[in-house]
Image (cartoon, rainbow, N blue to C red):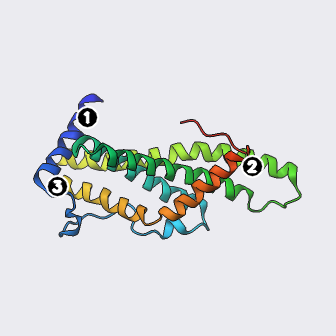
Amino acid sequence: MRKQKWLWVFCLVSIFLFSPVSSADSGSNAKPYLSSVKPLLDLTNVHDAARAWGVCAAAYNVTSEIYEELLEQPAQAKQMRQLSNGAEVVIAVMYLLDGLKDIEEDDFDHMSKAFKSSWEYGKEAMNSIPETQYVSMVADGERLVMAGADYKEFVDSIFMTTRVCVESLEVQQMHIDIYRDFVRKGWLAQPEK
């Protein structure tokens, strides 16, 4: 495991030493993992939206690692980790709200059970979905390393994805505010990571 991380970091260092970070705009064939904000805003399918927010959480984490380990910009790295945490909260809140949307207001017993089960599922999803997306992204990078391909394309894809995700920060903040209100009112406990 340690050897793989070293190889991964070595490849990313090589990319940044020999090419500009913002090269995604200069003819790269890179494609973002999330091509538009539409999946982040479309709440008709909570699973698709959760996967999209998982992509954002993972992209923010990979970007954080690049800032921390390669560019030695700890404040930028911390900001990306915070954005990742926020994207994870969105996933949990989305599942909670989706679980409650069809319940009659006066059906307190059903609402209580749905609230609890939806929140439990949301807490699990807020960890597992971003982790799955992260592993997928890093595996893409490792495949490029092993194939001797242009790693710059992978890094460009990550940064392009992060840019798409940043376009939805208002939606992310809205979900975080809902979560904070629920915690403040005592309806939820903060999830443990």
Image quarter for residue 156?
bottom left
Residue 4 tag number: 1
At which x and y percent is residue 178? Answer: 64, 55
* Quarter of the view holding residue 176: bottom right
Callout 2, which amino acid? Phe
Residue at the farthest top position? 2
Judged by depth in the image, the label closer to the viewer, 3 or 2, is 2
- On screen, residue 146 versus residue 47, left or right, reads left
Mark 2 or mark 3, which is nearer the start of the sequence? 2
- The residue under label 3 is 150
Badge 3 or badge 1: first in the primary sequence: 1
Residue at 50% over, 51% down: 86
Q: Are marks 1 and 2 in contact (CB under 8 Å)?
A: no
**Farthest residue, direction right:** 106
Kind of element beneath mark 1: helix
Q: Residue 167, how many percent across, how many down?
A: 43, 66
Crowding around mark 1 (Cα neighbors within 10 Å: few <14, some 14 to 19, many 20+) is few
* Most foreground residue, 2 or 16: 16
Residue 115 — which label?
Answer: 2
- Residue at the spot x=17%, y=44% of the render? 13
| Helix, strand or loop status at disc 3 | loop
Q: Amino acid at mark 3?
A: Asp
Is the residue marked by circle 2 packed among few (<14), some (14-19), or many (20+) residues within 10 Å? many
Mark 2 secondary-structure assignment: helix
**What's the distance in space between the residues labelled 3 and 1, CA to CA?**
18 Å
Q: Which mark is residue 32?
A: none
- Circle 3: is it few (<14), some (14-19), or many (20+) Cα within 10 Å? few
Give the CA distance from mark 3 to mark 2.
47 Å
